[in-house]
Structures are given as C-alpha cells and as structure tokens.
Image: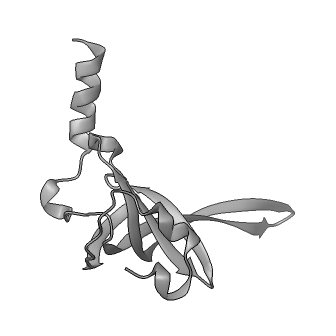
Amino acid sequence: MKPNLLIQQIEQKMLKPTTSLPEIRVGDTVQLDVLIREVVKKDVKAGNKQTEKVEIKERVQPYEGVVIAHRNGGIKKSITVRKIFQGIGVERVFFVHSRCVKAIRIKSKAKVRRAKLYYLRGTVGKKAKL
C-alpha cells in the first residue's frame, strides 16, 4: 500500500460528518464551542511527604466572531475568526475537524464581495461591522 493512500484513509476516519457541519462562508458571524483543557496542580500532604497531584479539567467555552478567511483541504480545513474583545481585535484560526471544536453555529450571514476580509483589521467602530 502506498504511503499517500494510507494517509488518506486515516484522514477519512478522522473527518467529522458533513451533516454536523454548517456551510460556513466568509462574512458569517459564527459561534464556536471550543474545548478548553486546564491543568490544575494541587499540593497533597500525606504524613511527612508532600506530593503534587495533577488534575485535568475540561470545559466548553463559546467563541463568537466574524469569519474573515477560510481554507479548504480535507482534514486541514480551517477558518479564521475575528472578534473585538475590550476594544482589541482578536483572531484565532480553528481547524473545523479538530476535536477541540465541539460545535459551530451560524448566527448571521453577510453578503461580502471579497474572499478574505483582512481589511477589517484596520477598521474600528461601525466600519468594522458587516
């Protein structure tokens, strides 16, 4: 078996079903549920010994913003989401088929005439709205 075919078979198994993914376009306002893992270290004292106990906590955090770019490519399909947090623009790139992305919901759609909305980086206030 060729290595390229083997990689394609493994990628096919890891893809999320297309029925669970909405059709995301540039200009859409989306809300993603992102899985956040936190490592909490606790000091445990047992007799004269003091040890560290490591606990992993998982929680789902919503992230809402405008899709300013997307890339297709099977398992590597990604979207770039931009939001304004306390007056500062924050952009994150999410792999759509990642296990960390639990759900994607489209809040609203906007008609745009560009493939990438990088011009939103230089705008503020009402000009930054679609």
Q: Is residue 18 visible?
A: yes
Residue at the far bottom in the pictured view:
126
Which residue is pictured at 33% across the width and 74% down the height? 30
Measured as percent of width and height from the top left, residue 9 is found at 21, 29
Residue 53, image quadrant: bottom right
**Quadrant location of residue 2?**
top left
Residue 99 visible here: no
Q: Nearer the viewer, residue 39 or 29?
A: 29
Quarter the C terminus occupies: bottom left
Judge whether 120 appears above or below 11 on screen: below
Between residue 54 and residue 36, name the one nearer to us.
36
x and y, in percent, of residue 48 in the image: 87, 63
Q: Position of residue 49 (x, y in %)?
A: 83, 60
Q: Residue at x 42, y 82 (%)?
A: 129
User: In this image, 102 relative to 117: left or right?
Assistant: left
* Residue in the foreground of this view, choosing between 102 and 88: 88
Quadrant where the N terminus sits is top left
Say which residue appears at 48% left-offset and 69% top-offset.
Answer: 82
When the figure is inspected, residue 97 is found, relative to residue 34, above or below; the finding is above
* Left or right position of 95 against 73: right
Residue at image coords 54%, 86%: 125
- Give percent across and percent down for residue 72: 29, 46
